[in-house]
Image (cartoon, rainbow, N blue to C red):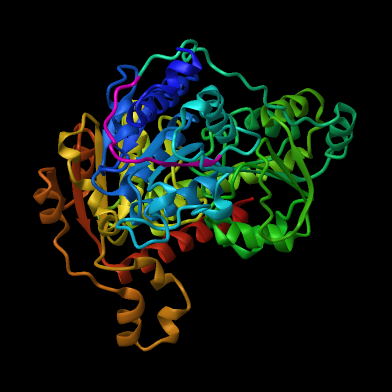
Amino acid sequence: MDSDAMRALAPADVQATFCRTLVRQWAALGIDRAFVAPGSRSTPLALALATDPRWSVEVFLDERSAAFAALGAGLATGRPSVVLCTSGTAAAHFHAAVIEADLSCVPLLVVTADRPPELRDVGAAQTIDQTNLFNNSVRWFHDPGVAAAEASGSWRSLAARCIHRTLGPRPGPVHLNLPFREPLLGRAIEIEGVDAPVGSLQGDAHVDSDSLAEVITSFAGRRGVVIAGRGAPREVALAAAALGWPVLADARAAVQDEAIRCFDSLLRHESFASTHRPDIVLRFGEGPASKVLAQWITTSGARQIFVTDVDRWIDVDHRIDLRIQVDPVAVCEAIARAASVAPAEWSSSWNRASELAQGAISRGLANTELSGPVIARRFAEGLPNGAGLVVSSSMPIRDLEWFGGALPHIRVHSNRGANGIDGVLATAIGVAVASGAPTGVLIGDVAFLHDSSSLAALARRDVDVRIMVVDNDGGGIFHFLPQASAIDPSTFETLFGTPHGTDLAALASAHGLTTTTIENVDDIARFVRTPGPSVAVVRTNRDADVEIHRRLHRSVADALDSGANQR
């Protein structure tokens, strides 16, 4: 259609054609999944998405849930999904997920409908200032104004730019704010060439090969450790083997079988921690949750090197000596080709300590007493091969990291960019929708209540989500902090224990979900083997959980002491 014919269209038809152009260009670029919260002002784009057969559209009653579900899809696929809402405070409910996408570098295309300029700042209903609503948390903000026929030549480019900006050197959220005028229903017209994707070449970060070789040469014969978190590739194991260094990995890292997963307990042992201080710490990806590990690295005085392919600065203790922004796989392969091995006793001492610690932890978790560590291990290891597991912040991620063991058969996700407990269920739904794989959720009771709106319509979704709720009637993590002993029990319980008194099983049942109450370890095994969507609630005691953690750490310390005496 030529420009004169376009200008002859009614305004509602121009809006509809604009939205169809966006949707078709996004599909041409390989984006075909949308998470939509219902509303009136977003009608033109919602209809364009829903009527395009290439698109999969999931509807959520709550904007916050929709946004976290889109975030989960991005975690699972590495590609952005569209999340769409109407105007006003609906857009504000996207903010928490946008922050997490920013800090975790997850691609996400946030589209907010808006009132046209003449309805702003005049007291019109459902109208707020949506300009730069998410501030610096987005990679790009754009408001093209109400769709105009004379701007139709820019529509494909606008659609493509949104996607390319989400996938740039530092992936993350893009905010597209779209004002629409009434009438909101129009007839979309075909535009020639709309399905031809607009390309973009992203510059690959690289490091001079001679400089990298010089860094690798400096590793020769040195004692070091490799820290692997989310974003660390499997090839980390090759590099570590070439160096003769242990890999200390959390559950989100791709390297599992070759890694030492009980590092938190090992480093709580004063003698082991002091005699195993490294010369070099080589870090890949986001940091594990363990504060013990972080403090040990900081006080070690080791040279710290951080390898990443994302343009994000991660240096919590301000001790990074060298930051290498390059493909981590390339660095690992270069190390594997050229590295000199550390003294043999360095690696063997770590491996021996790991064997002793894992044995002690396994024995400590062998009883039938239900606790956070027992639930985390049994639930994670029982998930089928290829499943996803979304783990809430607070105690669940720590229980899995410290006591979960190696988990090579599943892919673990956790929103650790901002470390919030919001949106965990929605994130898991997004992971399940995008991956098509069974998806477990390990979540505490407060996080479950916080995101309970995501349970709405879950029973009708075609997803296999198996939700394990650890219910200790409040905030269990606070019992591990100094506040627990420094504040009188009544005040502590009011401010930090925060008992909710909610029947979580009844809440899940009210949403039509299959619900189970866990009474013993065998119940966990039965539940995790059964396809969802479903919810299992297991009651634990906050004070008892603290003692179980202490007992497990003591058993590791005893095993290390016993092993040292036997040598």
Please tell me which residue is depicted at 50% across the width and 18% down the height of the picture: 3
Tell how many labels.
0
Magenta stretch containing residue 511, yes or no? Answer: no
Residue 197 place in picture, x, y as percent: 53, 16
In the displayed structure image, the side of residue 510 where residue 81 appears, left or right: right
Residue 440 place in picture, x, y as percent: 31, 39
Vertical relation: 368 (above or below) 548 = above
Foreground residue among 365 and 501: 501
Give the residues in magenta. Answer: 172-188
Residue 536 visible in the snapshot: yes
Q: Quadrant of residue 273?
A: bottom right
Foreground residue among 471 and 348: 471
Magenta stretch containing residue 183, yes or no? Answer: yes
Placement of the N terminus among the 4 image quadrants: top left
In the displayed structure image, the side of residue 362 where residue 126 appears, left or right: left
Vertical relation: 126 (above or below) 217 = below
Please tell me which residue is depicted at 32% across the width and 26% down the height of the picture: 48
Residue 292 place in picture, x, y as percent: 58, 61
In the displayed structure image, the side of residue 501 where residue 252 appears, left or right: right
Residue 386 visible in the snapshot: no
Foreground residue among 546 and 532: 532
Residue 349 place in picture, x, y as percent: 66, 45
Foreground residue among 336 and 52: 52
